[in-house]
Image (cartoon, rainbow, N blue to C red):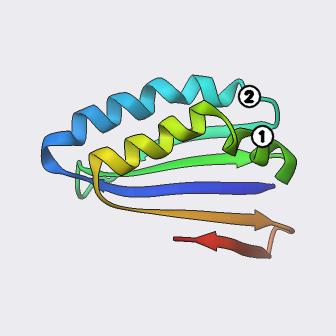
Amino acid sequence: MIILTFKAKAAPDNCSELLQALTSMLEHVRKLKGCLSCYCYRSVEDDCEFCFVERWATQEHLNAHMRSDLYSAIQGAFKVLTEHSKIELNMLTTAEDTIQLYTS
């Protein structure tokens, strides 16, 4: 399983716009072949902090998603509406072992 995580803090004026953008993308991502789950979380400590988590069955499924317009839209929302963001890509190999593939 591959886990793709976007973490970001939206600019105060953009919090609700980022939430709306991410919420609208959830169902589209969930319908993609190989998507195991997709969720958007908002911090209880800071309404402007978000975490968008996608879980993929295989690297091939994730690669197809990363080449899509939908993925570009997700990246664009984080780039335009946030003060800073971080992307993490992890592969879960066993229940006890996670390999970090990428972080920005």
What residue is drawn where x is 76% and y is 56%? 2
In the drawing, what numbered circle is on residue 32? 2
The local secondary structure at tag 2 comes to loop
Residue 8 visible in this rendered orientation of the protein: yes
Residue at image mark 1? 64
Q: Position of residue 90 (x, y in %)?
A: 70, 66
Disc 2 residue type (three-letter): Leu
Q: Badge 1: how crowded within 10 Å, few (<14), some, or many (20+)?
A: few
Q: Residue furthest left?
A: 13
In the displayed structure, would residue 87 be above or below residue 28?
below
Residue 42 visible in this rendered orientation of the protein: no
Q: Is residue 14 left or right of residue 37?
A: left
Which part of the image, by quadrant, shows the N terminus?
A: bottom right
| Mark 1–mark 2 CB contact (< 8 Å) | yes
Q: Is residue 16 left or right of residue 55?
A: left
Q: Is residue 38 left or right of residue 36?
A: left
Q: Position of residue 32 (x, y in %)?
A: 74, 28
